[in-house]
């Protein structure tokens, strides 16, 4: 799939929304990526994972590593397409850790995957973890780079789609200045 196709898929599935959003960081933004809207739909998610797997098919990947929680689903499905194993980098204190007996050998060829790149912090934590095992990072695969290409890593990196999403402190938010109400995201009452 082309990056245009991927972006259309994100928008059609309502994973990528435009409006006026209050982010968990407290900042305001005009774009919101609702990650589990895509991840909850296996038929769509697997098409996106296949695109990532296809991109890294000739990279010699031996293990796919993804950060919890969304990265578990992505790593598993990308690994399935590549015919390799997937392991998960869980929240440690600080940084990321492998649990459940997961480990890497020195020189093992690793593909790191995640869905959305905003500040790059979670990918950086996974890089540090993989480096601690002296494994060989052969690529970083992402569904969506919402940093507009501002965040980069010293490894071959491929984002299926890129958007430039601005975010502001509330006091500097141009949408607040225009009295635009916050966009209500879909919530289902039980
Ligand atoms: Zn605002």
Image (cartoon, rainbow, N blue to C red):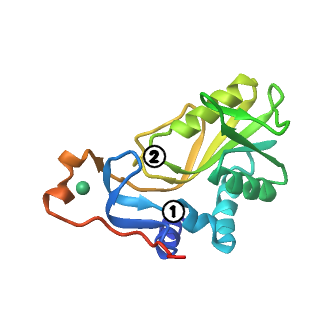
Confirm if mark 1 falls within 8 A of ligand 1.
Answer: no
Q: Earlier in the sequence, mark 2 or mark 1?
A: 1
The answer to which image quadrant residue 123 occupies is: top right
Asked if disc 2 and disc 1 are in contact, CB closer than 8 Å, the reply is no
| Residue name at image x 78 percent, y 36 percent | 99
Q: Quadrant of ligand 1?
A: bottom left
- Whether residue 61 appears in this view of the structure is no
Q: Is residue 102 left or right of residue 95?
A: right
Q: Is residue 136 left or right of residue 41?
A: right
Image location of residue 159, percent across then percent down: 54, 51
Q: Is residue 184 left or right of residue 126?
A: left
Q: Circle 1 sits on which residue?
A: 3
| Residue name at image x 63 percent, y 68 percent | 40
Image location of residue 171, percent across then percent down: 18, 46
The answer to which image quadrant residue 156 occupies is: top right
Q: Circle 2 sits on which residue?
A: 118
| Residue name at image x 73 percent, y 55 percent | 78
Residue 100 versus residue 187 in the image, above or below: above
Residue 36 versus residue 103 in the image, above or below: below
């Amino acid at each position: 799939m082309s990056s245009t196709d991927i972006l259309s898929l994100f928008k059609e599935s309502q994973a990528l929304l435009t409006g006026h959003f209050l982010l968990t960081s407290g900042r305001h933004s005009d774009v919101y990526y609702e990650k589990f809207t895509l991840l909850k739909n296996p038929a769509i998610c697997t098409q996106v994972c296949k695109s990532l797997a296809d991109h890294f098919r000739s990279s010699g990947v031996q293990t796919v590593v993804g950060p919890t929680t969304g990265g578990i689903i992505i790593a598993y499905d990308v690994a399935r397409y590549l015919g390799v194993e997937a392991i998960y980098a869980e929240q440690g204190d600080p940084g990321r850790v492998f649990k459940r007996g997961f480990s890497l050998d020195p020189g093992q060829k690793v593909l790191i995957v995640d869905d959305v790149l905003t500040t790059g912090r979670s990918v950086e934590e996974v890089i540090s973890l993989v480096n601690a095992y002296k494994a060989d990072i052969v690529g970083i695969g992402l569904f969506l780079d919402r940093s507009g290409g501002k965040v980069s890593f010293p490894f071959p990196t491929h984002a299926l789609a890129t958007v430039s999403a601005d975010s502001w402190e509330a006091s500097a938010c141009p949408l607040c200045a225009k009295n635009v109400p916050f966009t209500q995201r879909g919530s289902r009452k039980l």
